[in-house]
Amino acid sequence: MNLFFHIGRYFLLLKRVFGRPEKSRIYLKQLFKEVDNLGVNSVWIVVIISIFIGGIMTIQFAYSMSNPIYPKTLVGLGTRDTLILEFSSTMLALIMAGKIGSNITSEIGTMRVTEQIDSLEIMGINSAGFLILPKIVAVVFIFPFLFIISVFFGLIGGLVTGPVVGVISVTDYLKGIQFLFYPYYVTFSIIKSLFFGFIVASIPAYFGYHVQGGALEVGKASTNAVVNTNIFILLFDLILTRLLLT
């Protein structure tokens, strides 16, 4: 019953979030602020993680395909497809749930326990729409760009690491990442990124908006938000893969 209670309250919150805004100009200003705070400030960690993961994948694929019957180009192909299909969409969303999700929960939760949200309601402002809608739109907007950045720097990481450690030549790696490329894989992962962006923004916002207590409860809400967000990311990854890729 507790699960159905939270699901119902979550959708009731979304109904308020997507209600008609009081002043669109204020929402637009808040949107640009959230794009910078939640999206642009996350680029550096996406770049660093993707470079290292791209290098690690290249080395692992090279050693797993060390049999002479396998062409070396499969190393680049495996790195490319793994980045596009799973890491740069799903795994990146799980990482961003920890960074962006906890940020959203703690920010909104702190406003709740310090009664700032109550003050907005007293002034006649739709607090759910004002606080949550710009965050959802910003994260959904920025996630496909983070996906593209992740794929690019992941491939760069493999291109640098592979030849440096001597597991593959630059020529073989470049041939591999161009071999049997299916543009639909990119479309599929961008669609996933849009769904994941909505989940990463909305579920932590729900937990933050309904916090009760003090600073300790805000911390617990952040933990619960990240855990539940990760579960739903994996659930929707399974559903979308089944619907769009098989």
Image: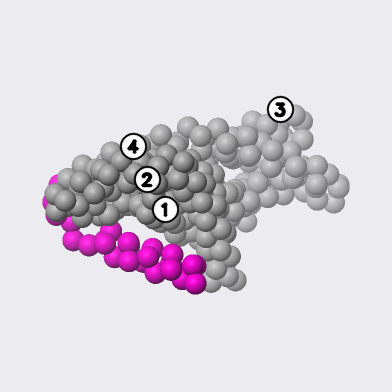
Q: Are marks 1 and 2 in contact (CB under 8 Å)?
A: yes
Asked whether 182 or 109 is in front, the reply is 109
Asked whether 138 or 55 is in front, the reply is 138
Q: Are marks 3 and 1 in contact (CB under 8 Å)?
A: no
**Cα distance, mark 4 to mark 3?**
35 Å
Residue located farthest toward the front when viewing the structure as drawn: 213
Q: Which residue is mark 3?
A: 164
Look at discs 4 and 1 and give the one toward the viewer.
1
Relative placement, left or right, of 17 versus 55 is left
Q: Are marks 4 and 1 in contact (CB under 8 Å)?
A: no
Which residue sits at x=26%, y=62%? 16
**Cα distance, mark 4 to mark 2?**
20 Å
Using a 10 Å C-alpha cutoff, classify the residue at mark 1 as few (fewer than 14 neighbours), some (14 to 19) or many (20 or more). Answer: many
**Cα distance, mark 2 to mark 3?**
47 Å
Q: Which residue is mark 2?
A: 109
Q: Which residue is mark 1?
A: 207
Secondary structure beneath dot 2 equals helix
The mark nearer the N terminus, 4 or 1, is 4
Which residue sits at x=68%, y=50%? 78
Q: Which residues, given as a range, are shown in magenta? A: 1-25
Asked whether 164 or 214 is in front, the reply is 214
Relative placement, left or right, of 62 versus 6 is right
Q: State how many labels appear.
A: 4
List x then y, in percent, for residue 29.
Answer: 21, 42
Using a 10 Å C-alpha cutoff, classify the residue at mark 4 as few (fewer than 14 neighbours), some (14 to 19) or many (20 or more). Answer: few
